[in-house]
Amino acid sequence: MEIRSWDFEVRVLVTGGAGYIGSHAVKALIEKGHEPVIVDNLVYGHKFVVDKVLKTPFINCSIGDKDIISKIVNGTHKKLQNTVHENKVIEGVLHFAAFTYVGESVQKPIKYYQNNVIETINFLDVLCPSKNSTSNNKIPLVFSSTCAIYGNPKGIPIKEISSPNPINPYGRSKLIVENILSDLNKAYNFEFLIFRYFNAAGASPDTSLGELHEPETHLIPLAIMAAFDEIDNLKIFGTDYDTKDGTCIRDYIHVADLAEAHVMGLEKLLEGKFRKDNEEYINQRIFNLGNGKGVSVREIINSVEKITGRSINYVEDARRIGDPPILIADYKKAKEYLGWEPKIKDIDIIVKHACNWYLKLKEQKL
Ligand code: UDP
């Protein structure tokens, strides 16, 4: 692979690009002049995000459908006719598509291993054909992983060298793929980066994109829904943790910062920074992406009350099974190797962006 300096745009396949984090990454790619194409099966993604906001080539399919993925990768899919992708090979991949509900993964592990692992193996087989190990046939990939692979970490803040010990099928499904990527690199020099996210939160500052999960299980959107009486009571899962106010502490990272990290990481991969001959970078493919600050459940409730000017009815409930008391990222490695660090660190601003998005959704009935 030749090393090119970063002054050109690339064609990027974004799996899960109609979902929460994926859609922000597509926006960030477009803003940097790149040419994304979205693959999403719309199980959890939203078509209106593609049609009304991103306006990007989109193919509704499973990432494990090798025939369709091959056509997309080669630019021969009929939906890519008359686009910049027609008959051109994809140059990079951001792989977001996955099921991400921890609780559901405990109830339905096969669903998670089937989707997050088996579909990904089929997908990787197209990107990295085992029959042909010439470098031209391998398309570099940034993989969405999660801090859930750490389980109950021993040290806080968590560094990437902390031993992985996931405590649910969701985390295990992500760790399996991390290991597969590492094996592909050893076998074929497959180029990849792994991003372990902490709690993605907030919405696009221009309110064009945001979080819309069905069902919603995440704290910030639920607290906003409670503030606007869309749900009766917010439940605080556990008030007897050994933390400053007894509630769980998480590291909330703005989704636009996460999106930017993906573009920066992919550009560095394509520059050849992580290639075998670059000793400084070669074993540095895994990065925590977080804010580096811990915020408790009660602090989130206070922030939502402050930003909305409304009070939240909440009940103190039992601990949620599988919730570690404290998760905070050490993101120094991403700063050192990717030149990335979060820009929107203030939880009130993160909450404010989430509120603005919520109100826009309600107003427009999207
Ligand atoms: N949480 C809560 N009530 C809710 C949803 C979440 O108290 O209705 C807590 C949860 O126990 C965790 C934190 O809020 O400590 C963040 O949870 P979320 O589901 O948003 O993200 P997770 O950390 O599970 O990925």
Image (cartoon, rainbow, N blue to C red):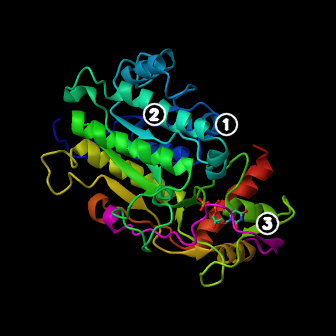
Tell me which segment is drawn in magenta: 308-335
Q: Amino acid at mark 2?
A: Thr
In which quadrant of the rendered view does residue 246 lie?
Answer: bottom right
In this figure, which residue is indicated by the disc labeled 1?
Answer: 48
| Residues at marks 2 and 3 touching, judged by CB atoms closer than 8 Å | no
* Quadrant including the N terminus: top left
Which x, y percent locates residue 276? 16, 45
Q: Is residue 267 above or below residue 300?
A: above
The image's mark for residue 234 is 3
| Residue ID at (58%, 26%) | 60
Which x, y percent locates residue 8? 29, 40
Magenta stretch holds residue 310: yes
- Crowd class of label 3 (few under 14; some 14 to 19; many from 20; radius 10 Å): many
Dot 1 or dot 2: first in sequence order is: 1
Position of 341 compared to 47: left or right?
Answer: left
Q: Nearer the viewer, residue 201 or 244?
A: 244
Q: Secondary structure at mark 3?
A: strand
Position of 222 compared to 271: left or right?
Answer: right
In this figure, which residue is indicated by the disc labeled 2?
Answer: 120
Question: Is the residue indicated by label 3 positioned so its CB lies within 8 Å of ligand 1?
Answer: yes
Which x, y percent locates residue 211? 64, 52
Question: Is the residue indicated by label 1 positioned so its CB lies within 8 Å of ligand 1?
Answer: no
Dot 1 or dot 3: first in sequence order is: 1
Q: Secondary structure at mark 2?
A: helix
| Residue ID at (49%, 30%) | 119
